[in-house]
Image (tube, rainbow, N blue to C red):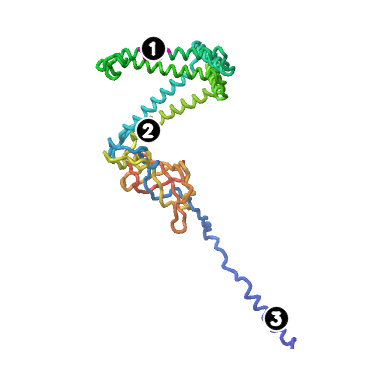
């Protein structure tokens, strides 16, 4: 069987080999011109990016408010008005603030005078007087501690007898002056309430009675031994007198000077604080700005911390993009030149430069993140206002 199939297998192999062999093409014509190969396609890089946006202030709006509560007495501006740096925009009644300032100044002057007196060097007469006080206090203490001698007791008794005699004489003189003796008729008797001479005589008797009581007490004390309380009180007088003398001799101590310096600084700070409060009675413009709004009314009370006047600084205004995608923002660099067209000035283009590319995304558009590019503009003398919208043409590759 294998011998019978062999011729057929050989024939089939020859047919398949003929089908697989390449078919020769026509011979090239030597008279036909040769065609050049097609060039490789080159994609040109983008040189311009367009982005929509609007104008915005370079600095936020300035909201000015009073720091004190008082009646508004002046409102010098209105919305839309231009103001210069240093202009007074509004003012409140500063009467109580001025009073507080004057009181602070008076207290500062008093403190300065007291400190100057305390720190002034002691006069020799003051030192001598303090020394005399020490000697006197020490003598009294020594005398009291030793107790009274016999001669001192006798002297106290003589003093009491003299006081009694003086009282007796004053009484006789009064009775004579007032007509109080038994032989004087009742009609001639006088009263201290009606007769000046009688009144004076009665005053002499009262004074003599007081002297007699004091002399008597001294006589009694002279006979008694000194108590511990009296000795302690006498020694306290000695210590106090010595301390006063030492202070005069040593001058102002460093600790006392430090305390005086602190008191003086506190008085000065109080004056400065009062001066600042007076200054706060006026709202002063910090810049050359335009008034956006006025929230205070003449005669009303100011509210600390609540915006009274809002200012806009229109000199520095910039263009901020709103729909620039992440695909385009990577090609933009600070300094790239920009041409901006605003709808308010459709026939004019404003020159500018990229100031900054804000790194934080401002939102998304579809699957793309949006970023903001800030552009400085040359206003070219035009009144550019925040919020004006338009389109920016950003030139890439040039700075």
Q: CA distance from mark 2 to mark 3?
A: 121 Å
Q: Is residue 199 above or below residue 1?
A: above
* Residue on which the image places disc 3: 10
**Percent coordinates x, y for residue 266 in the rendering:** 45, 28
> Between disc 1 and disc 2, whose residue precedes?
1
Please say whether residue 166 is one of the residues in the magenta stretch.
yes
Which quadrant would the N terminus be assigned to in this image? bottom right
- The answer to whether the residues at label 1 and label 2 have Cβ atoms under 8 Å apart is no
Q: Is residue 354 left or right of residue 150?
A: left
> Between disc 3 and disc 1, whose residue precedes?
3
Q: CA distance from mark 1 to mark 2?
A: 73 Å
**Percent coordinates x, y for residue 54 in the rendering:** 37, 47
Q: Which mark is residue 169?
A: 1
Q: Which residues are magenta?
A: 165-172
Q: Is residue 324 visible?
A: yes
> Between disc 2 and disc 3, whose residue precedes?
3
**Percent coordinates x, y for residue 108 in the rendering:** 41, 25
Task: Name the residue nearer the viewer: 20 or 231.
Answer: 231
Q: Is residue 156 above or below residue 33?
A: above
In this rendering, which labeled residue sits more in front, label 3 or label 1?
1
Q: Is residue 335 left or right of residue 12?
A: left
Please say whether residue 214 is one of the residues in the magenta stretch.
no
Name the residue rendered at 40%, 26% in the picture.
Answer: 107
In this rendering, which labeled residue sits more in front, label 1 or label 2?
1
Name the residue rendered at 45%, 52% in the picture.
Answer: 370
Q: Residues within 10 Å of mark 3 (few under 14, many from 20)?
A: few
- The answer to whether the residues at label 3 and label 1 have Cβ atoms under 8 Å apart is no
Q: Is residue 87 visible?
A: no
Task: Name the residue nearer the viewer: 76 or 40.
Answer: 76
**Callout count:** 3
* Residue on which the image places disc 2: 277
């Amino acid at each position: 069987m294998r011998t019978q199939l062999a011729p057929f297998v050989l024939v089939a192999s020859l047919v398949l080999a003929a089908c697989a062999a390449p078919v020769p093409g026509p011979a090239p014509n030597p008279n036909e011109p040769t065609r050049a190969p097609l060039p490789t396609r080159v994609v040109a890089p983008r040189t311009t990016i367009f982005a929509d946006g609007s104008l915005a202030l370079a600095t936020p709006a300035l909201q000015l408010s009073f720091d004190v509560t008082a009646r508004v007495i002046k409102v010098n501006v209105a919305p839309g008005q231009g103001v210069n740096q240093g202009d007074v925009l509004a003012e409140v009644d500063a009467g109580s603030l001025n009073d507080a300032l004057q009181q602070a100044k008076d207290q500062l002057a008093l403190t300065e005078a007291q400190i100057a007196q305390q720190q002034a060097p002691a006069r020799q007469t003051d030192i001598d007087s303090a020394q005399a006080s020490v000697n006197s206090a020490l003598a009294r203490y020594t005398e009291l501690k030793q107790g009274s001698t016999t001669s001192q007791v006798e002297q106290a008794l003589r003093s009491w007898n003299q006081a009694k005699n003086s009282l007796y004489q004053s009484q006789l003189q009064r009775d004579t002056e007032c007509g109080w003796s038994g032989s004087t008729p009742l009609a001639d008797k006088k009263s201290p309430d009606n007769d000046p001479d009688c009144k004076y005589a009665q005053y002499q008797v009262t004074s003599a009675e007081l002297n007699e009581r004091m002399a008597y007490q001294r006589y009694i004390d002279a006979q008694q031994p000194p108590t511990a309380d009296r000795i302690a009180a006498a020694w306290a007088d000695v210590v106090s007198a010595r301390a006063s003398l030492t202070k005069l001799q040593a001058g102002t101590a460093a600790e006392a000077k430090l305390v005086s310096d602190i008191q003086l600084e506190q008085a000065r700070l109080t004056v400065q604080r009062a001066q600042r409060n007076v200054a706060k009675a006026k709202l002063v413009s910090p810049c050359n700005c335009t008034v956006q709004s006025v929230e205070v009314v003449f005669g009303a009370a100011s509210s600390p911390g609540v915006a009274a006047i809002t200012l806009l600084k229109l000199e520095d205004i910039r263009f901020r993009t709103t729909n620039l995608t992440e695909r385009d923002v990577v090609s933009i660099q600070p300094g790239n030149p920009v041409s901006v067209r605003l709808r308010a000035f459709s026939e004019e283009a404003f020159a500018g430069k990229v100031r900054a590319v804000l790194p934080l995304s401002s939102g998304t558009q579809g699957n793309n993140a949006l970023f903001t590019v800030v552009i400085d503009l040359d206003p070219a003398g035009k009144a550019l206002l925040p919020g004006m919208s338009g389109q920016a043409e950003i030139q890439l590759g040039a700075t």
